[in-house]
Image: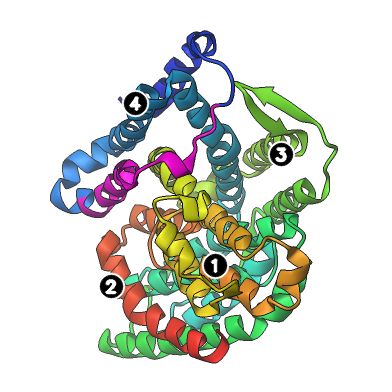
Amino acid sequence: MKFLSMLAMLVMTVLFPVAALASGGSHDLDGSSLEIYWIIPFVCMLLSIAVGPLIVPHFWHHHFGKVAVFWGLAFLIPCAWTFGFGTAFYQLMHVVLLEYVPFIVLLFALFTVSGGVRLTGRLVGTPGVNTAILAIGTILASWMGTTGAAMLLIRPLIRANAHRKYRVHSIVFFIFLVANIGGSLTPLGDPPLFLGFLKGVSFFWTTTHMFFKTLLLSLILLSVYYLLDKKLYGKEGRPVPASDGAANAKLGLDGKINLLFLAFVVALVLLSGAWNPGVTLSVFGVHMELQNIVRDILLLGVAGLSLRFTTQECRILNDFSWDPILEVAKLFIGIFVSMVPAIAILRAGEQGALAPIIQMVMVDGQPVNAMFFWLAGLLSSFLDNAPTYLVFFNTAGGDPALLMGEWATTLSAISAGAVFMGAVTYIGNAPNFMVRSIAENQGISMPSFFGYMAWSVGILYPCFLLLTWLFF
């Protein structure tokens, strides 16, 4: 059924008293005790996203939520059998309350607010206009977050190119630049950098140390995009959109109040990192910090205000639909839950089953910066880039003073890998999948999981090799 994932959550909640009686003490999952086969459900979850829409498209379209829950349970049930029901339940509640819910609440708020901002008049999707949209989004991403910038600009880009035959490349480069690379200059840009900020990295440290890397990578990609779009535009015969009333209207914004709400969202995220009253609440044994609870409640309130003060007509004309956020919510519950053992093994460091990976980044007590860049990046392409960043941050010593000083190149490598390589897959960063879902909802046939990777590996990896040679 449509809300099977929600039902699973409800059932587990009802069973919590049984779990509490069954066992006590700590329910942390010791990554050093987990064999590599514990990550099989996560790998299968990724493969399902990759091949499901290709092999069984009808089944996938109607049942992908059930598939996501299945792979989540494929970890939870063996976990309960091996470590006890209490441990499995605690792991579920921990990932849901501390990671999944804040993730979905923030996405929901940004999706709702940005969906109420509509560009009136018409932008015509010429190579110059499209490149300008991508450049503006890349700049905005570090100051309003990659998700905020992506949700704000993806619909104007799609509408500007509605008359174009070739549109997929524009969405792909939009994911590269606006949904990922552009968010590398401040802690507001991407969750890994925000975690670094909470760990003691100065707010503008990334601005100064990532600027030239981001600028070079952005200029290369914008240039490649412009040349590609220009070639395809000429191949299409330089099409002109059909004339209508909107063609002669001046450019403007409908739903401008949502820009204020968008600023509120950014402020709430920043405030939750700066305000720490030292108060925690225990929910199902999971310790939740007051500032994060307040942030999520207020984010939902901002989303409610956006719905209240934005006309229904504005959202209809903006092609607003709840389908993309529902798709992300269903798929990512499976991703977040099945990912738990993979993150636990990584956190175990040299005592875990992935010790060879950790050992590659440190040799005789000294960091190998190129390996920090590539391994942090490769893992961030498939795992949540925020905890992956923390794993390598701590592997490098976890001392912000050392990492901002003598080992500044190491911290730059970790930051660049976690942010830049989030663009390699649809699940590498939160807005990637959302942008893809919105594009498909608007009738654009996006590449499959592996099809998208053919774009990203072919275009981004040569750029990453250049960055490695120049900076790491």
**First in sequence: mark 1 or mark 2?**
1
Do tag 1 and tag 3 residues touch (Cβ < 8 Å)? no
The residue labelled by disc 3 is: 292
- Camera-side residue: 160 or 288? 288
Estimate the spatial distance between the alpha carbons at disc 1 and disc 2, rounded to whole Å.
19 Å
> For the residue marked with disc 2, what is the amino acid?
Ala
| Alpha carbons under labels 4 and 1: distance apart | 33 Å
Res. 178 visible in picture: no
Decide: is 455 above or below 197: below
Name the mark nearer the viewer: 1 or 2.
Answer: 1
- Residue carrying label 2: 454
Label 1 or label 3, whichever comes before in sequence order: 3
> Which amino acid type corresponds to the residue marked 3 in the rendered image?
Asn
- Determine which residue is flagged by label 4: 77
**Circle nearer the N terminus (4, 2):** 4
Distance in Å between CA atoms under marks 4 and 2: 35 Å
Q: Residue at x 49, y 90 (%)?
A: 469
Q: Which mark is residue 419?
A: 1
Q: Secondary structure at mark 3?
A: helix
Q: Secondary structure at mark 1?
A: helix
Which percent across, then down, holds residue 454? 28, 72
Upstream in the sequence, badge 3 or badge 4?
4
* Helix, strand or loop under label 4: helix
| Picture layout, residue 46 above or below residue 245 | above
Q: Amino acid type of disc 1?
A: Val
Asked whether 146 or 34 is in front, the reply is 34
Task: Identify the residue shown where x is 55% and y is 32%.
Answer: 94
Residue interval drawn in magenta:
27-51
